[in-house]
Image (cartoon, helix red, strand yellow):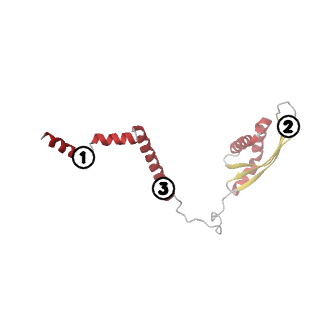
Amino acid sequence: MANTDTETEAEDQEGQAPVDGEKKGFVKKLFGKKKLLIIMGAALVLLLGGGAALYFFVFSGNNEPAKTAGNGPDFPATPPQVAYFDIPDLIVNIQSADGTPVYLKLSLSLELYTAEEKPGIQVLVPRIVDQFQGYLRELRTDDLKGSAGIMRVKEELLRRTNVAAAPYKVRDVLLKEMILQ
């Protein structure tokens, strides 16, 4: 009987599926714990990235039909209400680093919201020019260098224009000509 018991045990072991411990050992040997985590993390990132890309390309597209080259750009039915007012040319001496005389000539236009504001601005031009003169005379040649310097000057001129022209509101100060000599 001892012989038959060992034979039945061997048959049972051969016919049975491997035990859970044997499966874990196989996966551990094949991938390793760290490798398995890295692979699962990469698969998750790819899955999420693919889902985000699908959403972006499919659902967030423009609902308007694509324009063809023959249609051209769409313009508003009515043009914007804009008016321009020219300020007389300004010539001021500015400070230089070595004390030599340097002159700045500016030609400016004011961008107004409507043409009806032109008569009101015309009356206030001496006040606006006075504000410009006071500011421009304090500039140094280094203040006018580069596009950032020009933008700072335009912003300051716009601020001073809106202070001097109150209650009128000026949209922008446009440089027509700027000569530094």
Residue 40 is situated, as x and y percent measured from the top left of the image, at 41, 44
Q: Which residue is the extreme one toward the right?
A: 100
Labels 2 & 3 near each other (Cβ < 8 A): no
Residue shown at 46%/53% (left/top)?
51
The disc at residue 78 is none
Labels 3 & 1 near each other (Cβ < 8 A): no
The disc at residue 102 is 2
Residue shown at 40%/41% (left/top)?
31
The label nearer to you, 2 versus 3, is 3
| 3 or 1: tag closer to the N-terminus | 1
4 over 118 or under it: above or below: above
Residue shown at 29%/39% (left/top)?
21
Which image quadrant: the N terminus? Answer: top left
**Three-letter amino acid code of the residue under disc 3:** Leu
75 over 147 or under it: above or below: below
Q: Is disc 3 placed on a helix, strand or loop?
A: helix
Q: Which is more toward the observer, 14 or 145? A: 14
The disc at residue 54 is 3
80 over 46 or under it: above or below: below
> Label 1: how many residues lie within 10 Å, few (<14), some (14-19) or many (20+)?
few
The Cα atoms of the two marked residues, 2 and 3, are separated by: 61 Å
**Three-letter amino acid code of the residue under disc 1:** Glu
| 2 or 3: tag closer to the N-terminus | 3
Residue shown at 30%/41% (left/top)?
22
Relative placement, left or right, of 48 versus 93 is left
The label nearer to you, 2 versus 1, is 1
Q: Is disc 2 placed on a helix, strand or loop?
A: strand
| 2 or 1: tag closer to the N-terminus | 1
Residue marked by disc 1: 14
The label nearer to you, 3 versus 1, is 1
Q: Is disc 1 placed on a helix, strand or loop?
A: helix
